[in-house]
Image (cartoon, rainbow, N blue to C red):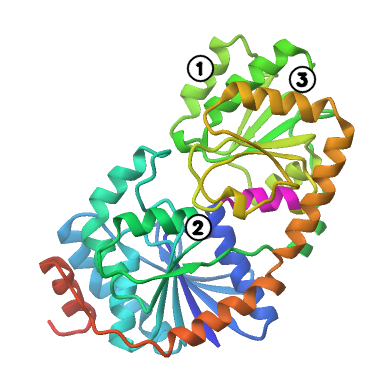
Amino acid sequence: MKITAVTSLYRPHVGGVETMVEEMAYASQNADHELQVITKQWPSELPIEESINDVSVCRVPTGITEDELLSNAATIRDRSQTILTNTDALHLVGMRRPLPLYMTLLAHVHQVPVIGTVVGTEIPNPGAPESQKIWNEGIPYMYDAFTNVSVLNAVSTNTLHLTSKVAPANTQMDGVLIAGIDYDYYQGIPAMQPPGVEGGFIFSLRRLEPSKGIDVLIDAYARSIETGWVHDMPLVIAGDGSQMESLKAQAYSLGLSELQVRFLGSIPLEEGIGMLKAATLTVVPSRAEGGGLVNTEANAVGCPLIASDTGGIREYTSEDAAILVPPDDSVKLSEAIDSVLQDKGTQTRLRNAGKLFAASRDWSVIMPTYIELYQRAAEIKRDLRLTTDLTRKIYKVLANEL
């Protein structure tokens, strides 16, 4: 099969969805299929077309205002024309506005089955206050995308539940589609110490946004310094985002030095995985999480894992492979950090159980489910239903009716 994956961001951007799509492409190739990517051209300096590690990538403009959405429609139609006339299935990985709408409408134009997978960032979540604003702004696009895909699913049971609460009444949800992992790839990445760090360290690979809970981790780390179990072990945080300066200020206010809490900013994925492999333990302190692929990544490299018991995290690790704590609770998180640091047996148990769990999520195990889904979607026929004047106008441009 020839599959086209659509995602808001792809390489060189780094994130859970970007990693999922990249590994989907490699898994497709290993199963004698082909996957190509359509993504947003942001920043605008990125090339329109390129091959990244043997994956063909096409970038298109999007927009926010009605004028931008209409003016970009013809460009999107023309850039994706060749791809969509030579694909067997279109997979929207993430339904965040407005690219999924464009591609859903184009799939109807080209009579291509389209699968929509909700990853969690595009729907309201009590643990991510910013998500409500994103949802409110995107309702005109996401509603018509939700109701016109062949199959709609989500990356976790929790995300499926949240989607069902806000999706249009006639939306048909298909269930959960778990993201896999390239287990052998993670085994081949060498362990890497963070710059200036010798010996053990606590690591967190996160976007620095409120829903990711890094402020909770910093509070917990400060508590664990007081209990004495951390000793001189630094907390290393890799990632960037809107909270960078406020988190630095928080660490300073708690009396933590730059040697104790080290902010690396954004780093390449392989460096992040290498540091996961070298870390004494890693913490995923999310307030909200659609899926949580970083948990499976930590399991794959044998890094002892502490994670919030929230969102889809339980489906991306297991109770044997992680210490799960309540979200937004720095006291419980500090206690978990102390319990792992003081017990080598717990560290060994988490490493071994984590590797077993991650191996069970290898793409060689997961990919047949995706191929069956694409084949099943081809048998589903749905009439196009558009609910707003804007989406009707966009469709006319995409269908070359204007």
The residue mark sitting in front, 1 or 2, is 2
The residue depicted at 62 percent of the width and 43 percent of the height is 267
- What span is colored magenta in the figure? 292-299
Would residue 273 appear left or right of 173 to someone viewing this image? Answer: right
Contact between labelled residues 2 and 1, with CB atoms less than 8 Å apart: no
Kindly identify which numbered label has been placed on residue 273. none
List the residue tagged with mark 1: 249
- The secondary structure type at the circle numbered 2 is helix
Circle 3 Cα neighbour tier, 10 Å, few/some/many (<14 / 14–19 / ≥20): many
The quadrant in which residue 336 appears is: top right
Mark 1 or mark 2: name the one nearer the start of the chain: 2
The quadrant in which residue 266 appears is: top right
56 in relation to 220, above or below: below
Q: What whole-number distance in Å separates the C-alpha atoms at marks 1 and 3? A: 21 Å
List the residue tagged with mark 2: 157
Would residue 67 appear left or right of 381 to someone viewing this image? Answer: left
Closer to us: 176 or 70: 176
Q: Position of residue 205 (x, y in %)?
A: 62, 40
Q: Amino acid at mark 2?
A: Thr
Would residue 246 appear left or right of 25 to someone viewing this image? Answer: left
- The secondary structure type at the circle numbered 3 is loop
Q: Position of residue 165 (x, y in %)?
A: 33, 55
Circle 1 Cα neighbour tier, 10 Å, few/some/many (<14 / 14–19 / ≥20): few
Mark 1 or mark 3: name the one nearer the start of the chain: 3
Helix, strand or loop: magenta stretch? helix
Residue 270, visible in the rendered structure: no
List the residue tagged with mark 3: 230
**10 inside magenta stretch:** no
The residue depicted at 31 percent of the width and 59 percent of the height is 97
